[in-house]
Image (cartoon, rainbow, N blue to C red):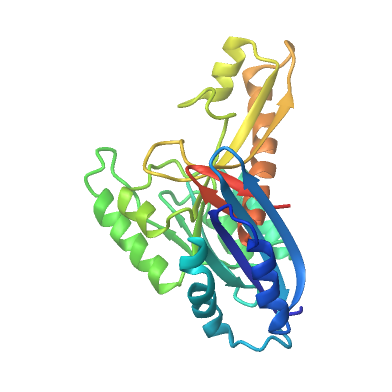
Amino acid sequence: MEQTAILLLHCPDKQGIITEITKFITDNKGNIVYLDQYVDKVDGMFFMRIEWELKEFLIPNDKISEYITTLYGQRYELHFNLYFNSVKPRMALFVSKMSHCLYDLLARYKAGELNIDIPCIVSNHEDLRYVAEQFGIPYYVWSIKKDWSNKAEVEAAEMELLRKERVTFIVLARYMQIISEEMIKSFPNRIINIHHSFLPAFIGAKPYHQAYERGVKIIGATSHYVTTELDAGPIIEQDVVRITHKDTPESLVLKGKDLEKIVLSRAVKKHVERKILTYKNKTIIFS
């Protein structure tokens, strides 16, 4: 695989930004293989993702950010993140008792669909240890008491594990615990959750039962980044499936589980491919 650099940036929209950035890359013998950009006319903001091959690029990898900051940081009020496709994201999976999302992500990982490493699976129950063992991934359990009296201690142990394993992002694959503010701040826009409804509709417990009682004709699933406001972080991916009066709460749950797997895997893939840019609690998803 050809080594590439990926630049995600946003700044106030000004004339000449695309020309300046592409010229910087080509002047230094970088071959651009991807460019996508978007202008938010309401806020007057410019967003771009650009990727280029590094084979003949004249600037060392560890100096590229410094060059971009010096040349364009103040001039364009530029905010950016730089990634390299040769550096695999390291994903920690957090699970409870439901296995459908876990199995789906692990199967995609083993099939080579996700260019990641998975150093650990974390849970508050023993139930899914057998799944982790099938895929040869270490499984760690910290039980949280009903009164949450040991929650701080548990999260401290989890954070130590994440540091030790150099985890870069977390996926909550139906992990039925609220994440603390400290952990969220340690992984800003790097904790991905799957919510089993089409947010902001049917929040809280048993959304499929709520949908059944309401008699809706579609149900949905939402994947989003976790913030300190419950189920209100930037939305990455959503989808829906049609239902009828013949559906039962049980059949809605089965349809919902299939949808959750697809929506979560799409969100994880976009994150791993560095195609998501967050701004003002929203996401710009590049193609």
Q: Residue drawn 58% across and 23% down?
A: 208
Q: Is residue 33 above or below residue 266?
A: below
Q: Is residue 77 above or below residue 230?
A: below
Question: Hey, which quadrant is residue 194 in on the image?
Answer: top right
Position of the N terminus, as image quadrant, is: bottom right
Q: Residue furthest front?
A: 15
Residue 121: image location, x then y, percent? 50, 60
Q: Is residue 242 left or right of residue 68?
A: right
**Would residue 8 be seen by someone viewing this image from the given angle?**
yes
Q: Is residue 192 above or below residue 52?
A: above
Q: Residue drawn 38% across and 42% down?
A: 178
Residue 93: image location, x then y, percent? 52, 56
- Between 72 and 53, the one nearer to me in the picture: 72
Q: Residue drawn 62% across and 61% down?
A: 274
Residue 196: image location, x then y, percent? 57, 33
Q: Residue drawn 56% across and 19% down?
A: 209
Q: Is residue 228 left or right of residue 43?
A: left
- Between 128 and 229, the one nearer to me in the picture: 229
Q: Is residue 206 above or below residue 49?
A: above
- Report the label total: 0
Residue 177: image location, x then y, percent? 40, 42
